């Protein structure tokens, strides 16, 4: 197994103590930082797919994301010298009136693992805060809104409407959460819907590529 | 006509029910927020937020908020409020609420429990949060789930500490109130999956509940009703093993009719009507009638109780719970 394959495998397995050393060995062996980063991104893609398929559960996804984070910490000083392959900035938050954060955190981890720079606004986020974040951050390509309650579906609608009517451009809006359906997402004007964190990462790449 | 209690027992035993059990009807036994036994000295010593009011700190030290418009309270887990930031230090940080109250404190609540007509309904004690919820109330969900991997021994110690406290509380409830049933909250999953794998659940959570529910079952409690409004079909064998009689809150993603067929007789299912579909601002009688009909027809008369998945009688939007009950009555007339 090549060192890059080993990095990928251990990210999938969530080996937080092993991955940093393997990343260093890959660097020492001549692999480029972007190649190593891509191997970790590929690993997280496998994790996302397995989660979507119900083969693994939230702890396995969290531990894999943590392993990747440890690996990225080793890579970061080296990545600065290369053109980083960022897909843009993603603003993410749970809409106003809703304090659920697990789903939002998972989506943030998975979208972040594909190469987006994540700006997490937390929970109970008013639509105005999403707008401010788009203005405050560079290269915003994606806004991700989460909502777990039927009571906050209207807040989701209002947030998407505010984003779309803001006059700001260059970004897409993706929504998700237990009560959200593809039909509701389309009805409120969102650009995409994802049923889970793994699917959100794939959808994010897809819609941003079309900008 | 059978009493509500008799009808429920006939339903879950595969006997001769004379109608559908209508949602929580057999559990509403007191004039409390959930209609169940809620008052006792241990609970009275804790504080609970009111909807839209100030966040409060409960007896475990967890800050709980209930923002306006939310259907329920929520633990606060920012850096300032998280109780347990390092699981390996749990013994120094986590302090369970005291249980040793003078008998006269319990005596205040006994007349209300004695007044329950136990022929008509169950004297049922409401208990929340459960063991898994207590873990993530203390440390936050992300830390909790990661700690199952990174600090399994410390997690097992803390789970034992929490479950021992729960058994201590169970002893007092059984001694003073002699409940016929317990309604125990502990959410074990999201809409689409259990939070943890069945293997992890078996290792960490099952032993705790075998102890807790085992105590109740050997001390006069006839019925264990467990609430988890989530997917948890993959955990049903463990629910049976730990002694759950009714899983309340089973959402439609579980394929409840299949569970009824597969496990009916060992456990019963109460739910299969998602609040996300029925209990909405734009709710309609038409959707309620359609969903109630689907649930009653596909699940049948035995081992199933038609009910919203919410963890207590009532609904977020006024009128929904009552509309569901009326439609269930219609289905009873049609199917029985």
Image (cartoon, grey):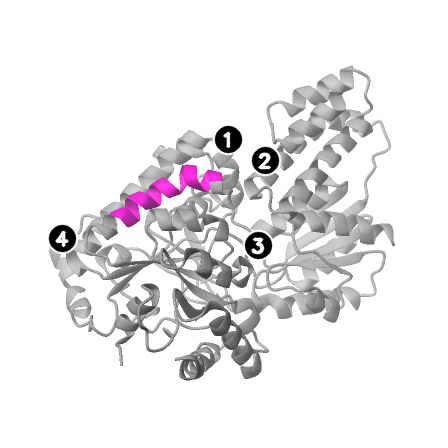
> Quadrant location of the C terminus of chain B?
bottom left
Residue A139 on image: x %, y %: 82, 48
Of circles 1 and 4, which is in front?
1
The location of residue A77, given as percent across then percent down, is: 76, 25
Which mark, residue B192?
Answer: 3
Q: Which residue is mark 2?
A: A63
Spot occupied by residue B272 in the image (x, y as percentages of width and height)? 49, 66
Q: Position of residue A27 (x, y in %)?
A: 77, 19
Residue sitting at 60 percent across and 46 percent down? A54
Q: CA distance from mark 2 to mark 3?
A: 20 Å
Give the labeled residue for mark 4: B102
Looking at the rendered structure, the secondary structure element under dot 3 is loop
Q: Chain of mark 4?
A: B
Q: Chain of mark 1?
A: B
Which residues lie in the magenta part?
A: B199-214
Q: The residue marked by circle 2 belongs to what chain?
A: A
SS at mark 1 in the image: helix
Q: Are marks 3 and 1 in contact (CB under 8 Å)?
A: no
């Amino acid at each position: 197994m090549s060192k890059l394959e080993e990095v990928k495998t251990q990210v999938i397995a969530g080996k937080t103590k092993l991955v940093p050393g393997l990343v260093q060995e890959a660097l020492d062996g001549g692999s480029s930082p972007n190649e190593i980063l891509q191997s970790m991104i590929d690993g997280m893609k496998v994790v996302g797919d397995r989660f979507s398929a119900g083969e693994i559960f939230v702890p396995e996804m969290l531990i894999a994301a943590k392993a990747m984070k440890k690996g990225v910490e080793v890579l970061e000083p080296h990545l600065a010298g290369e053109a980083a392959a960022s897909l843009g900035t993603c603003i993410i938050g749970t809409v106003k009136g809703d304090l659920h954060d697990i789903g939002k955190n998972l989506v943030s981890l998975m979208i972040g693992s594909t190469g987006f720079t994540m700006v997490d606004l937390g929970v109970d986020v008013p639509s105005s805060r999403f707008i401010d974040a788009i203005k405050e951050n560079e290269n915003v390509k994606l806004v991700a809104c989460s909502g777990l309650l039927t009571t906050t579906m209207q807040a989701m609608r209002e947030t998407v409407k505010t984003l779309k009517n803001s006059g700001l451009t260059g970004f897409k809006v993706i929504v998700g959460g237990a009560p959200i359906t593809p039909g509701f997402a389309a009805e409120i004007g969102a650009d995409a819907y994802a049923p889970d964190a793994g699917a959100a990462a794939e959808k994010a790449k897809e819609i941003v590529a079309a900008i | 006509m059978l009493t509500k209690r008799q009808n429920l027992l006939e339903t879950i035993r595969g006997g001769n029910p004379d109608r559908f059990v209508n949602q929580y009807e057999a559990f509403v036994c007191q004039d409390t927020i959930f209609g169940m036994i809620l008052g006792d000295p241990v609970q009275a010593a804790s504080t609970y937020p009111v909807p839209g009011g100030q966040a409060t700190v409960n007896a475990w030290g967890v800050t709980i908020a209930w923002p306006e418009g939310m259907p329920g309270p929520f633990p606060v887990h920012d850096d300032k409020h998280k109780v347990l930031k390092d699981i390996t230090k749990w013994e120094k940080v986590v302090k369970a609420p005291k249980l040793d109250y003078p008998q006269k404190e319990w005596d205040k609540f006994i007349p209300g429990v004695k007044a329950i007509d136990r022929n008509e309904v169950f004297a049922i004690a409401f208990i929340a949060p459960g063991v898994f919820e207590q873990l993530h109330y203390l440390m936050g969900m992300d830390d909790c789930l990661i700690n199952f991997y990174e600090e399994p021994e410390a997690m097992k110690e803390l789970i034992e500490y929490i479950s021992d406290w729960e058994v201590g509380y169970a002893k007092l409830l059984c001694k003073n109130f002699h409940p016929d049933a317990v309604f125990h909250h502990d959410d074990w999953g999201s809409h689409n999956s259990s939070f943890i794998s069945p293997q992890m659940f078996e290792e960490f959570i099952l032993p705790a509940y075998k102890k807790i529910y085992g105590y109740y079952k050997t001390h006069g409690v006839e019925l264990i009703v467990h609430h988890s409004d989530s997917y948890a079909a993959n955990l049903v064998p463990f629910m049976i093993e730990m002694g759950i009689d009714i899983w309340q809150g089973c959402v439609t993603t579980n394929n409840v009719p299949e569970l009824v067929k597969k496990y009916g007789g060992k456990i019963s299912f109460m739910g299969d009507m998602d609040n996300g579909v029925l209990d909405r601002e734009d709710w309609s009688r038409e959707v309620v009638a359609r969903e109630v009909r689907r649930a009653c027809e596909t699940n049948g008369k035995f081992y199933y109780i038609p009910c919203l998945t919410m963890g207590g009688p009532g609904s977020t939007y006024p009128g929904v719970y009552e509309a569901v009950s009326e439609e269930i009555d219609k289905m009873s007339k049609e199917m029985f």
